[in-house]
Image: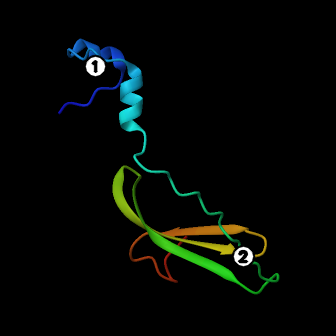
Amino acid sequence: MERCDDLGELQSKAYRGGVAIIRDDLRPKRALRPGRATVRFETEPGRQLQMDWGTQRTVIAGQPIEVHVAVSTLSYSRRSRGRGAAPGAGPDHPR
């Protein structure tokens, strides 16, 4: 079945119904569960840090490259710092 983006497009494909029947069909068949608020875990200043890392493909100097990325976030202040490095970059690699 082809995807249609609006009622006019559906009608041009021989649809004779109205928009209400489409809304009724798209409406959830059961009641949605209420969302749960995220509970923030509180710590004292200097007690906890969250570290996330991953890789990201990008283009540097016209060359596709996979960059390793690390982001650290202080739990108390939510201050973040990120750092990226190309593969093979070690302590002796110029920054």
- Is mark 1 in CB contact (under 8 Å) with mark 2? no
The quadrant the C terminus occupies is bottom right
Point 36% across, 17% down: residue: 18
Mark sitting earlier along the chain (1/2): 1
Point 17% across, 33% down: residue: 1
Q: Which residue is mark 2?
A: 75
Q: Which residue is mark 1?
A: 10
Task: Please say if 73 is above or below 17.
Answer: below
User: Is 11 situated left or right of 1 in this image?
Assistant: right
Name the disc covering residue 41, or none: none
Instruction: Name the outermost residue toward the right.
Output: 45
Decide: few, some or many residues near mark 1? Use Cα within 10 Å; few <14, some 14-19, many ≥20: some
Instruction: Name the outermost residue toward the front.
Output: 30
Task: Please say if 12 is above or below 1.
Answer: above
User: x, y percentage for residue 14?
Assistant: 20, 14
Which of the pair 11/32 is nearer the observer? 32
Amino acid tagged 2: Ser
Point 61% across, 63% down: residue: 36
User: x, y percentage for residue 19?
Assistant: 39, 21
Point 50% across, 82% down: residue: 92
User: x, y percentage for residue 84?
Assistant: 52, 68
Helix, strand or loop at disc 2?
Answer: loop
Which of the pair 28/85 is nearer the observer? 28
Colour approach in the figure: rainbow
User: Is 78 situated left or right of 19 in this image?
Assistant: right
Helix, strand or loop at disc 1?
Answer: helix
Q: Nearer the viewer, mark 1 or mark 2?
A: 1
Amino acid tagged 1: Leu
